[in-house]
Image (spheres, coloured by chain):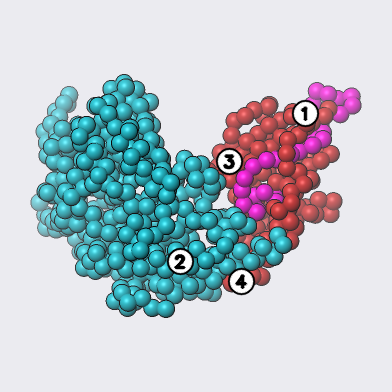
Chain colours: A red, B cyan
Amino acid sequence: MSLDNLRDLYQQVILERYKKPRHRGKADPVDRYQRGHNPSCGDTIELTLHLSSPEGDATDPLLQQIEEVKFDGEGCAISMASADLMAEALRGKTVAEALDMVQRFQSMMRGEAEFPKDLRKLNVMQGVAQFPVRIKCANLSWHTLKAALESAQTAEPVGW
Amino acid sequence: MTLATERSLATQYRADFPILNQQVHGKPLVYFDNAATSQKPTVVLDALMHYYQHDNANVHRGVHTLSSRATDAYESARDKVAAFVNASTREEIVYTRNASEAINLVAYAWGMTTLKPGDEIILSVMEHHSNLIPWQLVAQRTGAVLKFVNLSDTQEFDLSHYKTLLSDRTKLVSVVHVSNTLGCINPVEAIVAEAHRYGAKVLIDACQSLPHMPVDVQAIGCDWLVGSGHKMCAPTGIGFLYGKLDVLRAMPPFLGGGEMIADVFLDHATYADLPHKFEAGTPAIAEAVALGAAVDYLSGIGMNAIHAYEQELTRYLWAQLQQISEVTLYGPTPNADASNRASLASFTTGAVHPHDLSTILDQAGIAIRAGHHCTQPLHRIIQAQSTARASLYFYNTTSEVDVFIASLKEAIAFFSDIFG
């Protein structure tokens, strides 16, 4: 078996996060809720976000700050680890910054970009780009996040 | 280990499938995804090529030589399919794109026009989505009610529960012959006989039985039976519906268009006789011809021989899987001669998610399926979000099972190292 290839995909961090996620659960309070589903494999994620408004400019939703992201769901090591790492990386980001991160993550899955130093933990997902059929696993949480941020609070599932 | 019949089957016929002779990620391909689609033997590929190089023309239209040859090839393939399932006449075989289209044909042409509010349709909880969604649509449109046969303790079709569901309100029973997930072989003769006592019609989804064992529509006694070409050595894009002659005659057309007509006027038309009444438009001619070649090929080997060999493979596969403590298997345990189940095994392992397992095995050249296999409700019932499935065919060998088992153990170890 080509274990070297597999170690690129299943980096230690990914397996650890799969085994012991740090951000499973439900945000309190829930300002955004979004369910994401990959019907081809059955992976499911429920994402909850707690947002706060910055001083002075409460009207611009893009400047709202992400206080907490939690996820629940069932899926493979890639999708669950990706969700856990994402939840961690989003803390303290504004909605606008988070939407940029969604773009960057999807570029990374195409092998076109990586994250800067302060977000380099997310770069462990780079190995997934070599396994095209698994990219949707890594993208599930980010796709769900985008829907959560772009919509008002909703329970509509995100399809693929 | 070499099985007695293996020398005369897998080793004898494997060379007919050139695709099997390749390396994937540097390892010999082990193709264990046959329940999704089978590979195609050279004779079937040759039939496609021969048709396009020598006989290609539209069918039932021209009087020229090629059209006549194309029509003969297309219609003689129908004779082969009719003989393969022991239909009483060739008019009982309607070509469709696939089994889903065949079920939809019955759902729309019969279900939508016949069923009334309160009529009951009995399905089982193990149905493939293709034998569930069409009936949901029919029920929503007609007011008919869906009833579901549960699993028994052994995760098989619960015949006694089925009997309690039957009543004078039952108008249709539509069930799978062999479950693509559980691998159980359902007692279709008994299912049909019980349903007919109440005057209900019965449709059998034979996608997973036709490639692997003899299927005799007259012995089963069903009103309809559907099959999928690509799971039985034929190309994609061709399937068929068997229907009893009087049942098909009583049904209005499904799709309208060329080929299915007799006389056409601007405001009305009369329809062609069976089976063309249900074959609107230019059909998949080459694929139908190739289906005929596939049926000839399988019949040449013998469906009894295929079934017997696959039962040996099943016992071998199952025994190995049972020895791995992390593996949970679904569906009935094979009995002494494995006559109660098909040559597939759906399973989960504690540590490795089926999708991760499929990626890891792929690196070892092994193709298995991971997911819900188009049976989402069944997966909820067996409490598995998804399962891994190894599904074998007569060209697979016990040596391939050994490779699969060794890689499966490696994959479990790979994850267990991390998990401690």
Q: Earlier in the sequence, mark 4 or mark 1?
A: 4
The N terminus of chain A lies in quadrant:
bottom right
User: What residue sits right under mark 4 in the picture?
Assistant: A2
Residue B319's disc is: 2
Which label sits in the foreground, 4 or 2?
2
Is A113 contained in the magenta span?
Answer: no
Task: Describe residue B416's horizontal placement relative to residue B130 as left or right.
Answer: right
Question: Disc 1 residue type?
Answer: Pro
Disc 1 target residue: A29
Q: Disc 2 marks which amino acid? A: Ala
Judge depth for marks 4 and 1 and give the one in front. Answer: 1
Q: Is residue B236 visible?
A: no
Residue kind at label 3, given as amino acid type: His
Q: Which residues are magenta?
A: A54-82
Which residue, given by chain and number where applicable, does mark 3 sit on? A37
- The residue lying toward the viewer, choosing from A66 and B123, is B123
Q: Are there few (<14), some (14-19), or many (20+) residues within 10 Å of tag 2?
A: few
Q: Evaluate if marks 3 and 4 touch, with contact meaning CB atoms under 8 Å apart.
A: no
